[in-house]
Image (cartoon, grey):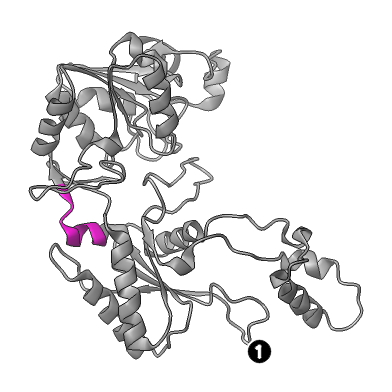
Amino acid sequence: MRYIGTTVRGVRTPVIKQGDDLESVVVSSLLRASKEHKFEFNDRDVVGITEAVVAITQANYISKEQLVKEIKEKFPKDIGVVFPILSRNRFSLILKSIAQACEEVHVLLSYPSDEVGNHLMDVDKMYEQGLNPYIDSFEEDRYRELFGENVPHEFTGVDYAKYYKSLGNGNVHIHFSNDPKYILGFTKNILVCDIHTRFRTKKILEESGAKTLYSLTDIFSEPSHSHGYNPEYGLLGSNKVGEGKLKLFPRECEDIVNSIQKRLKKETGKDIEVLVYGDGAFKDPIGKIWELADPVVSPGFTNGLKGRPKEVKLKYISENWNKNGDINEYVKNAIRQKKEPDYEVEKSLGTTPRQLTDLLGSLCDLTSGSGDKGTPVILVQGYFDDYTKE
């Protein structure tokens, strides 16, 4: 019997830079790790590659000057920036460039938090003050009257309303509402900046009389030889690189993972699944921050990672054992039955039906982190095994 199930390894690579052959780095690093640490590859192992190194090797960058130019070309002198997330890394350079490109910038912030859980106010105090987030819209002076002149974020200590306002030259105005139509009272030229709710927000504004209307997905979405781009996500998923450059979310990821899969098959003889992963999809229980600031967990993955797990709840099965025969065999037989057409759905109660790529991408993100571990490649083994696997 096996005594170890799923194992996850962070694989160290050389420092990856612009122009590197990423596929060769990934494959050679995996093979070297296998040799040095004496483990073998198996069919249905999973290799994860962080999106950051994919974008780096693609040189998928834009400069602040290029962003200012793009905004000027798409918008007139005034602009409404609707539902941006609160992030110095993700949005500050975008807003600074917008403020440089346009004469008047109206920023509409959702409350009590942004889309991914960064809070602008204490929720209990919000209700004590009589604010109803479903119907109330208000201005910055009301925000200060209710919550004070300094409202620090729990983790960063940043007052984001004050900080975002400071990114302009006196031309950035802050508004608060969860109704995107509120911005139309100030301007009809709109840039939709939310991530996972962007389609609904854009549709509401389009039906409500917006004149110039784009989302972040429409900015730097066209192919170019002079700067980076992403045809599907544009500026969504971008990260700040210093004070004058943004790294965009990687593109052409499916081509990359399929090519790496073929090279691993040639080198190991095994059918190994591969995905590119970004932010994991999990929520911090203290700060209430939902980690997923990227548009998706995985922008590219091999075919074997499509769909959801089909699992049974081992605890449910064991608790319903009739005490006849060996409990281990009873459990194994119940697991084998999940492949049969008359499989009982009740045996899966309590297993969360999430996408495989969301589960695996979150596992990879938690393993590699975003700091100094130096493991942009993750090897997951035994993930698809169950209790019947010897």
* Closer to us: 155 or 382: 382
Query: Which residue position holds label 1?
Result: 1
Q: Residue at 74% of width from left, 67% of height from top?
A: 341
What kind of element bears circle 1? loop
Determine whether 332 is above or below 371 in the image: below
Q: Is residue 203 left or right of residue 130?
A: left
Give the residues in magenta: 53-61
Determine whether 253 is above or below 220 in the image: below
Where does the image place residue 239, in percent across and percent down from the top left? Answer: 25, 46
For badge 1, the amino acid type reads Met
Q: Residue at 43% of width from left, 39% of height from top?
A: 196
User: Is residue 270 found inside the magenta-colored segment of the image?
Assistant: no
Where does the image place residue 159, in percent across and percent down from the top left? Answer: 33, 28
Where does the image place residue 78, in percent across and percent down from the top left? Answer: 20, 16
Q: Residue at 65% of width from left, 89% of height from top?
A: 1
Q: Is residue 179 left or right of residue 31?
A: right
Q: Quadrant of residue 4?
A: bottom right
**How dense is the environment of label 1, judged by Cα within 10 Å: few (below 14), some, or many (20 and up)?**
few
Q: Residue at 29% of width from left, 78% of height from top?
A: 27
Where does the image place residue 318, in percent across and percent down from the top left? Answer: 80, 70
